[in-house]
Image: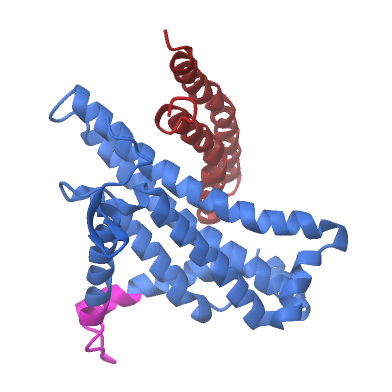
Chain colours: A red, B blue
Amino acid sequence: MDYAAIASIFCAAFAVAFGAIGPALAEGRAVAAAMDAIARQPDAANTISRTLFVGLAMIETTAIYCLVIALLLLFANPLLA
Amino acid sequence: MNSPLDSTVLFQIGPVPITQAIVTTWAIMAILVIGAFALTRRLDLRPTRRQAALELMVATLDTQITETTGAAPAPYRGFIGTLFLFILVANWSSLVPGIAPPTAQLETDAALAVLVFLSVIWFGIRAGGVSGWLKTFAAPNPVMIPLNILQSLTRVFSMFVRLFGNVMSGVFVIGIVASLAGLLVPIPLMALDLLTGLVQAYIFAVLAMVFITSAVEQGTPNSAKTDLTLKKKDT
């Protein structure tokens, strides 16, 4: 058995799985706070949602990093080359 | 399955391999340049319907730039607008069958991020001179110099990994789903991908704008203060 390949696949799966937890919770909090703000001040909805989108993209980046790491493990793994 | 980190080489010009993404990029550039030229060739004081639509787009862009930065949009309109339009068209080019979006390749995104990095330097030097721009690295105090240098590099890195990751993951997921379940199943994912493409293009442009403004405002201390007070009055 090739243990390097098996370990890489498991690590890729774990990277995506656990890497998604933090950003998911964070995005939930951010959206909830934005909804609260829009409910309090509907006039500022445009500004709030614009800031929200930028903020969400920043938060999402951490999950994307995990995805990129997982893809590196799967497709550009130095141990398997 | 093909690795998303590889790129398919179509042909070579001398020692330079020309990949599929580069050819798509050239096509998008040609479409944008010829389209912009053809649409703005006859501009009138009394706008036609076509010109009114174009003016609406430019006015929206200007409003966005002004709201993001609090500065006059004119110096940034060309760069930010081109950046946004190019990334948007590139992200949505996956709608054409057989075309993979060039932004799903690491090289294209890296090139775009390097453009942003250079433009931050360019606008920073133009606003405050070389010394003013160098002083932005010592803000708020000289202890922060290594961190500021590091930050100016890592934010560019995070910018292109963000764009690459989002676009590439969309393409990748659609590829996997299409290989599993054929005909109509990937369509909702494709719709989501279009939304992601729009949001990512918008975010790339907004972040570029924010980085440029931070360099410009810190480089010119007087205008920075007036800008801040103006912003406070607005809100």
**x 50%, y 81%: residue:** B74
Residue A47 lies, in percent from the top left, at: 55, 56
Measured along the vertical axis of the image, is residue A17 above or below residue A44? above
Give above or below for B125 relative to B116. below
The percent position of residue A64, horizontal first and vertical second, equals 49, 37
Rendered residue at 25%/27% (across/down)? B177
Foreground of the two, B8 or B57 = B8
Q: Is residue A11 visible?
A: yes
* Residue B45 inside the magenta-drawn segment: yes
Q: How many numbered discs?
A: 0
Q: In the rendered view of the protein, which quadrant contains the C terminus of chain B?
A: bottom right
- Quadrant of the snapshot with the N terminus of chain B: top left
The furthest residue to the bottom: B45
Q: Of residues B96 and B235, which is closer to you in this image? A: B96
Residue at x-position 53% and y-position 42%: A56
The front one of A42 and B158 is: B158
Q: Residue at x 41, y 74 (%)?
A: B59
Give the magenta-colored segment's residue range: B36-55
